[in-house]
Amino acid sequence: MLFKPSSRKIFITGITLCLQVLSATLYAQIDDSYLATFKERRVEISSIIPQSRVVVNFPSKGRLKKSRETRVILYALPNGNTIEQTEGLFFEDIENREKEWRYDIQHIAAQVRFLRERDKRFNYIVVYLESTTKAWTSHASAHSNSPALYNFLLDSIQKFIAYQLPGIAPLPRQRLILASHSGGGRFVFNLIKGMDSIPPSIERIAFLDSNYGYETELHGDKLYKWIQAPPDRFLGVISYVDTTVILDGKRVVSSKGGTGYRAHLMARDLKESGVEMALISDTTFISYKGRGVEVKIKENPSGKIYHTVLVERNGLVHMVLSGSRLENRDYSFWGNRCYSKYIINSPER
């Protein structure tokens, strides 16, 4: 059994000794020159919990404002992806671009750079959460105490950020956004499972086609109570009808196992609990929207795979800004990439 070390010990072993600036890799090409271009600082923390990698991306100190509260986006990675692939990169060489296609399907770093430029209400820090098993689903299965582990990881990251930026991002001035894609949703759901209630420090929860693991009995009441409590909270879900997808002659998900079905279930549970939502439907999306919640489900009569496209087409940007005065300003969900010029090596820079 894994015993949780004391907070003092984890601070020393998990942060001070294991803190390191990531070096460039052959394909990621994330080095000091690129970080300087975007005025960022990129730090890795290892060994906070078993089989995990954490990378924290800070804007430069010159871009951090004491007058602003700090939004910390914790992004739980999809199955099969590394942090570097999730951050994103443009390859000029076509052969490399085709070979390393995972670098061009999320572009979370560029989407966060767009947010930093457009949303001057907050400082933005993004934290990438990777399981070294390449899947939070298998990580959770391997660790029976994963709810406690994930809460400990979250607590350690918050304390690390407060330690790094004591005058700018102390714990009371951190606003957390729990975001996830694909199997990263398992991290978020197990995190919630380990909480008596979702704390007020969590401002937003964003499921980017990652809500497979939603269960009414485990999560419904906690999400409802969290949405209802002041100050304003926001739950965002983007999914698609994946039950129509056929791959190698078989359905990729069962009739009740996909994100589209689970999104309808989440919306139904919230409505039955008392959350008022309008139902908006067209040929592209079915949307449930109300105070503190937006659930979008992509229609899919032709059985296409939209799993990563939901992220690529400004998915994270929309989940962070939806419901605010900046919603759809200088971007549109499901439109062209609003963040292209913020991609490393982008020809649009």
Image (cartoon, rainbow, N blue to C red):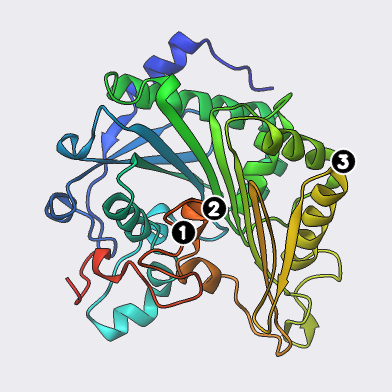
Q: CA distance from mark 3 to mark 2?
A: 27 Å
x then y, percent, for residue 20: 27, 34
Asked whether 136 or 51 is in front, the reply is 136
Answer few, some or many: residues within 10 Å of disc 1's Cα (few below 14, many 20 plus, some between 14 and 19). Answer: some
Name the residue rendered at 65%, 84% in the picture: 304
What residue would you read off at disc 2?
323
Badge number at residue 108: none
Q: Nearer the viewer, residue 10 or 310?
A: 310
Label 3 Cα crowd, 10 Å radius (few <14 / some 14-19 / many 20+): few
| Callout 2 secondary element | loop
Residue that badge 3 annotates: 217
Instruction: Please give left or right for residue 60 compared with residue 279 in the image.
Output: left
Q: Quadrant of the C terminus?
A: bottom left
The quarter in which the N terminus is drawn is top right
Q: Nearer the viewer, mark 3 or mark 2?
A: 2
Residue where numbered disc 1 is placed: 327
In-front residue for pair 316/327: 327
Q: Are the two marked residues, 1 and 2, in contact with CB atoms closer than 8 angstroms?
A: yes
**Residue 213 appears in the figure:** yes
- The vertical placement of 303 against 33, above or below, is below
Q: Amino acid at mark 3?
A: Glu
Q: Looking at the image, which residue is at 71% across and 27% down?
A: 197
**What is the number of callouts on the image?**
3
Amino acid at pointer 2: Gly
Instruction: State yes or no: discs 3 and 2 in contact (Cβ < 8 Å).
Output: no
Q: What is the quadrant of residue 140 in the picture?
A: top right
Pointers 1 and 3 in contact (CB under 8 A)? no
327 and 142: which is toward the camera: 327
Question: Residue 38, position in %: x, y?
Answer: 19, 53
